Amino acid sequence: PLRRPGQWLSALVLLVLFAMFVHTVLTNRRFQWATVGDYFLSGSILRGLELTLWLTAAVMATGYLLGIAVAAMRLSRNPVLSSLSFGFVWLLRSVPPLVQLLFWYELASLYPQLSFGLPFGPAVATVRTAHLFSGILAAYVGLTLDVAAFSSEIVRGGILSVDRGQTQAAQALGLGNARIFRRIVLPQAMPAIVPASGNLLIGMLKATSIVSVIAVQDLLYSSQLIYNQNYLIIPLLLVATLWYIILTTLLSVGQYFVERRFARGSGGGNGRTRRGFWQLLRGNAPLLGRTGTELAGIG
């Protein structure tokens, strides 16, 4: 007799549905796959792709460093630092990234000029805000702060996942705080930090598409500029979609191997710690979804 007929039946139904989906995508002429191929490697699309990659890398690098500092403040015994970091995370997690970008882009409406100097003293330099905060800078600042808020919680959660008794035992042996953190806390915290950080990176790559609202010529906005001229909306959206799928797939593959490396290093090689490659890929590949704050898997 067939074992587990329910699983086989559900698998068969899913395969049939998948085959129907592939068939309709490939045979529907309205997708205009020939046009997709014509624009897939066009100069405008590749320049937008380059800006998307640059913005993602810059935002993640700066935002994560700032997030580490915020996490350290939150874990500090200083009530002022802890309260300030809590307020920072609370505010940034409460405001959608698109709203943050629009506020930074319209900062000149609140502060026409920015002055630099001693607090409550004379200004050393003054600059017009409209000249300073271009669309790309507003996007960089807004997304960086968003990454900082969520990465700080990722780092803090990873550190708190380490049994405090181990650090107390290390202190009893006379080890310094820096050595305890480097040799004991960090290696055990990384298996918890890496998966969430990978999800944050993938989410932020897709979240950069919101910068098209403030006319930053990323991958999506480059596609929009083209289809605003030739009205080939679906093919150009498919071009952007395919590039996002390719990039998220590559990042998912990298995330899988990095997770496996840290799981092996921490002795967490069981099935509960390691996620299957295809499971990880299916979880990160979809393009549709909300912005990076939700895709980070926090909050």
Image (cartoon, rainbow, N blue to C red):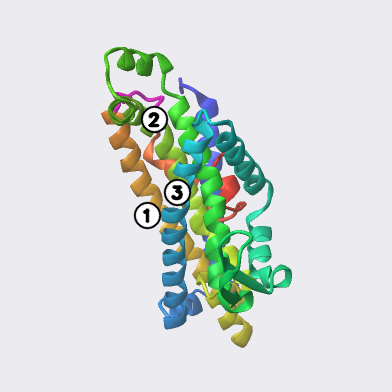
Q: Is 55 rendered above or below residue 63?
A: below
Residue topped by disc 1:
250
Quadrant the C terminus occupies: top right
Q: Nearer the viewer, mark 3 or mark 1?
A: 3
Q: Is residue 85 above or below residue 237?
A: above
Q: Which residues are magenta?
A: 266-273
SS class, disc 1: helix
* Left or right of residue 100, residue 52 in this image: left
Q: Position of residue 32 (x, y in %)?
A: 54, 76
Q: Dot 2 corresponds to which residue?
A: 189
Residue type at mark 2: give it.
Answer: Ala
Residue 81 position within the rendered picture, expressed as x and y whole percent measured from the top left: 55, 37
Instruction: Judge by depth and name the residue closer to the eye, 256 or 68.
Output: 68
> What's the CA distance linking mark 3 and mark 1?
21 Å
The foreground one among 214 and 103 is: 103
Task: Name the amino acid, label 1.
Answer: Leu
Characterize the local packing of mark 1: few (<14), some (14-19) or many (20 or more) Cα atoms within 10 angstroms: some
Across and down, in percent, residue 232 comes to 60, 80
Q: Quadrant of the N terminus?
A: top left
Tell me residue 281's x, y (percent): 43, 45
